[in-house]
Image (cartoon, rainbow, N blue to C red):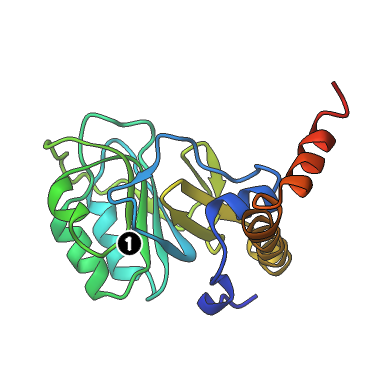
């Protein structure tokens, strides 16, 4: 199933998470370097093995424009697997963003840029290149299972992973949720009677 970026306009991680009933939401440790960063694209997965940073450059070489690098660090949190050089290369190569369940460095420069990077934290130290990592494997990132080609959507609230084969229905349901929320904000809440009725309905099970 082909990914069309324009189809994802008008949704958010919150509406996507609701559409997926919470499944595929990365945990709260994964946040954008800048809250205005937003990304969407198919996953190109990276499996870090024994703190191998070389595999990140293999991913930069092999990933297609529009894809999101999703990096599983195998629990590492004491070294940084990418910095501003990797980010600038990724941007030059036309990638849609980077998500890493671990640390980056050069965080200030990255946060001031326009390329979306979502990470667990930052640390100055980098590891050695040991050439053990793998790409395009099934991985776990931020507690979510990520397969190559799954759709990765990130914004200020975090990252949601959408199965490729479910993307049409998920986006449709997410847009319905966005429309319902807009109605509540613009019509229901300003109307005292409608608001009271809504609140009464929320309490029926007390």
127 vs 190, left or right, is left
In the picture, which quadrant includes the N terminus? bottom right
Q: Outermost residue toward the front?
A: 192
Crowd tier of the residue under label 1, counting other residues whose Cα lies within 10 Å: few below 14, some 14–19, many 20 or above: many
Q: Which is nearer the eye, 195 or 21?
A: 195
Q: Is residue 123 above or below residue 23?
A: above
- Observer-nearest of 199 and 51: 199
Q: Position of residue 13 (x, y in %)?
A: 54, 53
In the picture of the structure, the residue carrying the numbered disc 1 is 59
Q: Residue furthest right?
A: 204
Residue 169, image x and y in percent? 74, 65
Q: In this rendering, is residue 112 above or below 67?
A: above
| Tally of numbered tags | 1
Q: Residue furthest top?
A: 206
Q: Is residue 70 left or right of residue 22?
A: left
SS type, badge 1: helix
User: In x, y percent, where is residue 72?
Assistant: 40, 43
Residue in the image at 14% along x and 40% along y = 126
Depicted 53 relative to depicted 78: above or below: below
Between 3 and 6, the one lying in front of the other is 6
**Quarter the C terminus occupies:** top right
Q: At 15% from the left edge and 41% from the top edge, which residue is drawn?
A: 128
Q: Give the residue displayed 31% in from the left and 75% down from the top.
A: 94
Q: Is residue 57 left or right of residue 204?
A: left
């Amino acid at each position: 199933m082909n990914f069309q970026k324009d189809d994802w306009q008008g949704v958010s991680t919150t509406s996507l998470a609701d559409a997926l009933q919470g499944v595929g939401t990365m945990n709260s440790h994964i946040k954008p370097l800048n809250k205005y960063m937003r990304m969407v694209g198919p996953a190109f997965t990276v499996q870090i093995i024994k703190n191998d940073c070389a595999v990140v450059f293999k991913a930069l070489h092999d990933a297609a424009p529009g894809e999101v690098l999703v990096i599983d660090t195998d629990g590492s949190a004491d070294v940084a697997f990418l910095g501003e050089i990797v980010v600038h290369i990724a941007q030059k190569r036309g990638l849609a963003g980077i998500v890493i369940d671990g640390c980056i460095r050069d965080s200030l420069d990255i946060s001031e840029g326009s390329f979306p990077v979502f990470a667990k934290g930052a640390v100055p130290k980098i590891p050695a290149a040991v050439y053990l990592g793998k790409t395009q494997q099934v991985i776990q990132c931020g507690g979510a299972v990520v397969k190559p080609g799954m759709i990765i959507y990130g914004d200020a609230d975090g990252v949601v992973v959408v199965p490729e084969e479910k993307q049409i229905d998920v986006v449709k349901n997410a847009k319905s949720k966005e429309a319902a929320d807009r109605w509540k904000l613009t019509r229901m809440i300003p109307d005292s009677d409608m608001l009271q009725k809504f609140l009464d309905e929320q309490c029926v099970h007390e």
